[in-house]
Amino acid sequence: MFKKFSSLNPPSYDGKPDPVEFEDWINRIDQLFETLQCPKEWRVDFAVLYLKGQASLWWKVNKERKNEPRFGWTELQKLLRDKFYPPSLRKQKEDEFLHLQRGTMSVMEYANKFMELSRFAPELVSTEQSRMNRFERDLHLKYQDRLATQRFNSYQDMVDIAVNVELLVLLREAQNVGDKRKNDNQNHGGAKRPNQGNHNYRKNDSRDQGYNERAARNVWCAKCGKRNHTESECRAGKKTCYRCGGKDHFVRDCPKPPPTYTGRATSANHERNNNNDRVNHNPPRPLISGKAYMMRADKEEEDNANADTIPI
C-alpha cells in the first residue's frame, strides 16, 4: 500500500506559517487516501513521513500522541492546525476573504482567489446558494445584469457562465472602440500622412540654420571694430594672416579664398544688381546745348540786327 501511495508523489509540509500551503497539503493527502482507499490505521504513519523541517521536528516531540486511543488522521490534522495555523492567522485569512474584491482581476482569476480564501471561512459558504450569492455580489454590475436572467444548478455552473459573459462583454467593448476611432478619423479627414511631420521639421531646421548664419555675420568685434568675429577671435596686432591665421604670410598673400556669404546678403546684392540693371536700361538723355540771342543796336537805321551767340 505504501508503495502505491509514494508512487503518486505526495507533497511535503515544512511547518512554515502559510495557511494556503498548509491547507493544500492537507487536501492533497486526503485525496490520495481516498483514492487508494487507505485503511484509517495506516494514514497517520503515511502522512508523518511527508513532514519535513520544523514540522518533522515537532512530530518527533509529539509522536507519543499516536498511542492515544482513537488517535487518527483527523486528530493529527487538528494538532497540526493548532501548532502551525494559530487562531490569529486563521482570523487574518478569514478577514481577507470577507473583504475580497474583484478589482482588476478577470472572472477566472477572481474565482480562483474566491475558492482559495473561502476555505478559511467555511461558515460563510456552507451551502451552494450562499457560495453563489457571495461570488455574484463582487462581480461588475454589467456582468450581474446578464447573470440575473440565468438559472444556475451549482456554483461551478455560475462561474462558467460568468466567464463566458465577460468574454462577450469585452469583445463588444473592443468593437465599439474600433468603430468610434474609425468614425473619428472619417470626421477629421483621415489620418495624417507619415512624411508630413518630417517635411515640416526639415523646413524649420533649414530656417533656423539660415538664421544662425546671419546672426554669426552680425557679430562685431569690440577690439578692431570689424564684424564676423568676436574679440577673442580677433587677430589685430598679431603677426598673423587675418584670414586664415597663418604666421608665414599676410592677408594679401593668403592662398585661402575670401569667404562668400549667402542668405540675406546675397539677396540684397541680387536686388541691388537688379536695380542697377533697371537703371542701365533707361540711360539719361544727353544734354542739349542751347543758344541765347542778344540784340545790340549800333545804328538806328540798320534794318537787320547782328546777333552774338553765347553757349549755355
Image (cartoon, rainbow, N blue to C red):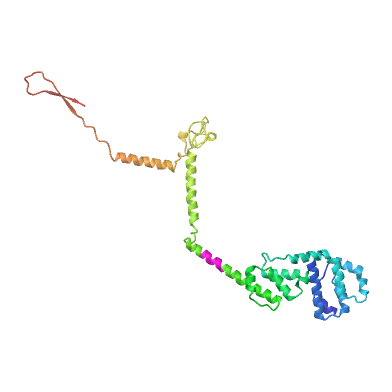
Whole-percent x, y for residue 300 in the image? 8, 19
Q: Residue at x 50, y 64 (%)?
A: 183
Quick check: 138 left or right of 243?
right
Whole-percent x, y for residue 119 in the image? 77, 71
Magenta run includes residue 276: no
Instruction: Report the span colored magenta.
Output: 175-182
Q: Nearer the viewer, residue 41 or 6?
A: 41
Question: Quadrant location of the N terminus?
Answer: bottom right
Asked where in the image residue 89 lies, by quadrant, the reply is bottom right
Quick check: 218 left or right of 15?
left
Question: Quadrant location of the C terminus?
Answer: top left
Whole-percent x, y for residue 151 in the image? 66, 78
Residue 44 seen by the camera: yes
Q: Is residue 149 above or below residue 201?
A: below
Q: Residue at x 87, y 70 (%)?
A: 79
Q: Residue at x 47, y 50 (%)?
A: 203
Asked where in the image residue 161 lies, by quadrant, the reply is bottom right
Residue 10 seen by the camera: no
Q: Nearer the viewer, residue 263 or 53?
A: 53
Q: Is residue 278 above or below residue 303?
A: below
Q: Is residue 275 above or below residue 42?
A: above
